[in-house]
Amino acid sequence: MNHHVKKITPETSDLSRRTFLVGTAATGLVLGYAGVPGVGEALAAAPANFEPSVWYAIAPDGLVTVTCGKADMGQHIASTMAQIVCEELGAKWSDMRVNLASNDPKFNDPVLGAQITGGSWSTMMNFDAMSRAGAAGRMALTEGAAAAMGVPSGELAVRDSMIVHAKSKKQMSFADVVKSGKATKTFTPDELKAIKLKAPEQYTMIGVSVPQIDIPSKTNGTAKYGIDVMIPGMVYGAVVTPPVRYGATVKAVDDSAAKKVPGFIKAVTLDDKTQTTTGWVVAVANTYANAKKAAAALKVSYDGGPNAKVSSESLLDEAKRLQKLDDSGQFFVKDGDPAAALGTAAKVLEAEYTTSINIHAPMEPMNATAEFKGDILHIYSGNQFATRSGAIAAGAAGIDPKFVVMHQMWLGGGFGRRLDADMMVPAVQAAKAVGKPVKVIYTRENDMTMDFSRPLTYQKVKAGVDGDGKLVALSHDVVSAWPTQRWGIPDFLSPSVDKKGPLDAFTVNGSDFFYTVPNHHVRAIKNEMAHSATPSGQLRSVAPGWTFWAVESMIDEIAAAAGKDPAQYRISLLDGAGNNDGGAQRLRNTLLAAMGLAGYGTKKLPKGEGMGVACVSSQERATASWTACVAHVAVAPSGEVTVKKLTVATDVGTQVHPDNIRAQVEGAALWGLSLALYEKATLKDGGIEQTNFDGYTPLRMSQMPEVAVAVIANGEKATGVGEPAVTVVAPAIGNAIFNASGARVRALPITAEAVKGAMKA
């Protein structure tokens, strides 16, 4: 395909440390890092430990503590990292422990790159490196044991934390070898690359649903989340946010009523040079309850700024205006000549697809605790992008990033919300203003109205078929805010095919699908109005959450126009022509698996019911997990949609923890259902109108359908599972609605009113 997608790989991911705001965080002082409270012990504090890698250490008692450089927000990634190490190390699972990485420069790994958790990348990008780290430890321990026993290392076997010499019956535990001090072998990067890892048929840990290491502490209350942090002398901050999402400034603050609140200390107006926040005030008091009372008592007047009159309608109008301009945006895909092919096509279809603003709303509210110890700023928070967030904290404090110590906590949900560090800004500036440690906790209203939301999107798709119904051309324009560009990290952007400059591929990934179409253009168009008024973030599934809504809906529309079964039509398009990496075949197989499990095409359904299909290559084309869904729905004459069953098949290559994979796929599918039918935020007068779960209504337990999951584990490279199933559900439901009722819906969320209107049309 004649397009370029920047693949964030182990080879390229270190570039972010060179080129953006946090570049200095990876150099300079190695500060006095302490272990994260309640998570694990600091590895550097025990000199008798054997540390084959920066990512794990073996103590003299034989316990193996793996440090996870990824944020753990309930997806058990810390336990997964431990499981990968354990497989090659040969340790006993009950000896494994986990620890969360700080921003100590030693964790800026030249292979694994920046500490960012997203894109369903974690297992995919860490599997090889963590496997090699485990294997290196096993080899070093084996050589140490051989020296201690006086036997050849090649005659030793390792399993369950024991090193055994069968001939002499001698054996040593990992603890014995560590205490002996004989394990001293180190490995160069080239030597690590040369290690021969186990073949899948040799695995004894990978592919086993072992007990998750983090569950006991999370269920007995000993695991510490950001909201649990307690520091001697700590006070609390509650934020007062403006009625406009972004661009407002504080004109005046009257704190006379707040001074009557017991324990009130100070009202701090933020001066945020990082431009993460605008128009915020923090009320600081001795307790959180008093801080909230003081915040409510503050009288703040604002200048609403340039976005004070912006609405969802004006954002959509602007998107449509931009799409109509011939010179808007940059090309992400530019194959062939769709305009010419559409001109000679036997039939041309054209459709508009939209998605609304969506909010993350994780259960643990946003929070951060800041403490200055001399020149050093300590930040305690759960965060998905420690590399960038440390720089934002430093910018808020007006200090060099090398003087910031980030203490990573467990995350009570993230889903992309905690890629941003806005919660750190008020904590840092309040702590600096009052000279005490400050913990800031958002209310639900703070978080919903100030979320870095999934952007409102508008997509225009034109497709042409020949006389046989074969797809000959597809033109696809995607208009949205550009969340990744907002980060200010040049190397996270991708060069455009038409050389017009970089584009945010994380707004168009998925549009570069694996279907064969000779003439295919995709244009990425930045909506500057949305970019400014609703500074957007990455919500679980990122661009494929909207691009596949358009692509998979249009493929169905094309199949219907050609008089072909939509599933079989997809199979005919997944012929692999021009794709030499087998991606089309893997997606085809996944679709067939979902169809088989669902009984697609084999059942006569009652009137008003239908099945719809969709298949996706999320997240990015270069880091795809092949996922397909068959949705079974019932549509009432009123337009009310009931989802009876979702059948999801996904090809994950190598599965580390089968139960965890199924749980993540189920959760992703249900999030996709929630976005498809229930979730919508709206902008009015520059502000988000929904402030809690009464106005913003995710899927409820009573709305749960049956969910069936098929996991395809074929021994290929491990792929990600946290997000792909989010992207496949909405189009499958939309297509099922058409098959059930004849109603074609093109806007998310799908409403009864829209379905009923389409039925009449």
Image: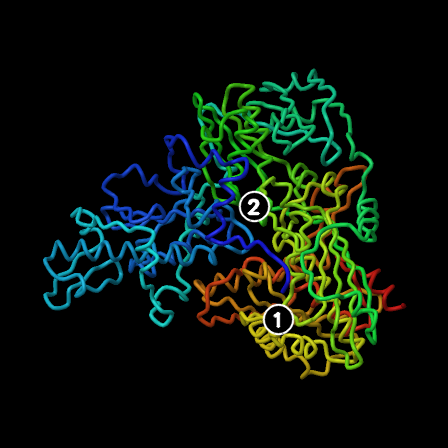
- Which residue type does callout 2 highlight? Asp
Per the image, the residue denoted by label 2 is: 491
Query: Percent position (x, y) of residue 561?
Result: 81, 75
Label 1 Cα neighbours within 10 Å, binned few <14 / some 14-19 / many ≥20: many
Sequence-wise first label, 2 or 1: 2
Residues at circles 2 and 1 in contact by the CB criterion of under 8 Å:
no
Asked whether 617 or 195 is in front, the reply is 195
The residue shown at (74%, 60%) is 476
| Circle on res. 647 | 1
- Which residue type does callout 1 highlight? Thr
Residue 197 makes an appearance in the image: yes
Query: Percent position (x, y) of residue 48?
Result: 23, 41
Q: Secondary structure at mark 2?
A: helix
Does residue 760 appear to the left or right of 576 in the view shown? Answer: right
Figure quadrant of the N terminus: bottom right
Q: CA distance from mark 2 to mark 1?
A: 37 Å
